Amino acid sequence: MDNPVTPRDTGRPGPRRRDRHGRGMRGPVAPPQVPLAASRGEVFADLVQDSVERLERRWPQLADIDFLVLDVPRPPAAGEAWNDEAVPLGGTVPSRDGRRGRVVVYRRPVEIRTKGRDERALLVHEVVVEQVAELLGLTPETVDPRYGED
């Protein structure tokens, strides 16, 4: 026990390529190009973008609106009363003072209300249509004639 054991030199510096038992490869399970590697937030943002692209074909003025995805709605500011209504799925910020209008979709409330990807995609599209309709001052059926049919 008086002799200290010195670690073996592997001959190559850098990250280990196998797990500590020498069996498996370390690193990502899938390359970044495949859908498995996309996070839930990225997949949700893609659903919103698909919905926006679908509406932009009919409404070219949507190019002047920013579409954002936030995880949850912000709590009320100091001095504002709490709202007893249900948690919102989306919101709008009208354009003013040279700022572009914004449509915000809240990811977590939408995910909680849906069970699968198809159902989530339908709800995301409904939320985007409703918020665009509010921002443009139109009815959702005018923005998307198929609104509410799915």
Image: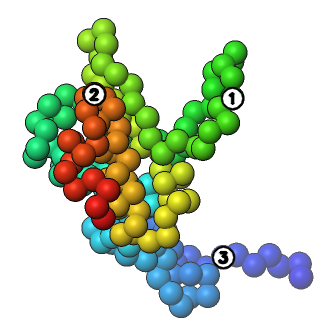
User: For the residue labelled by badge 1, is the local secondary structure a helix, a strand or a loop?
Assistant: loop
- CA separation in Å, label 2 and label 1: 26 Å
Residue 66 position by quadrant: top left
Q: Nearer the viewer, mark 2 or mark 1?
A: 2
Residue 55 as seen in the image, left or right of residue 67: left
Q: Which residue is mark 3?
A: 7
Identify the image quadrant of the N terminus: bottom right
- Mark 1 residue crowding within 10 angstroms, few (<14) / some (14–19) / many (20+): few
Image x and y of residue 104, in percent: 40, 37
Q: Is residue 18 above or below residue 140?
A: below
Residue 34 in picture, x, y percent from top left:
30, 71
Name the residue at 38% across, 47% down.
127
Give the CA distance from mark 1 to mark 3.
61 Å
Frontmost residue, 52 versus 41? 52
Indicate the quadrant containing the C terminus: top left, top right, bottom left or bottom right.
bottom left
Does 122 sit above or below residue 31?
above
Which residue is outermost to the right?
1
Does residue 50 appear in this view?
yes
Mark 2 lies on a secondary structure that is: loop
Q: Earlier in the sequence, mark 1 or mark 3?
A: 3
- Between 133 and 64, the residue placed more toward the observer is 133
Asked whether the beta carbons under mark 3 and mark 2 sit within 8 Å of each other, the answer is: no
Q: Which mark is residue 137?
A: 2
Nearest the viewer among 3 and 31 is 31
> Three-letter amino acid code at disc 3?
Pro
**What residue is shown at x 22% (from left), y 56% (from top)?**
146
Residue that mark 1 sits on: 82
Note whether 79 is above or below 82 in the view shown. above
Type of residue at label 1? Trp
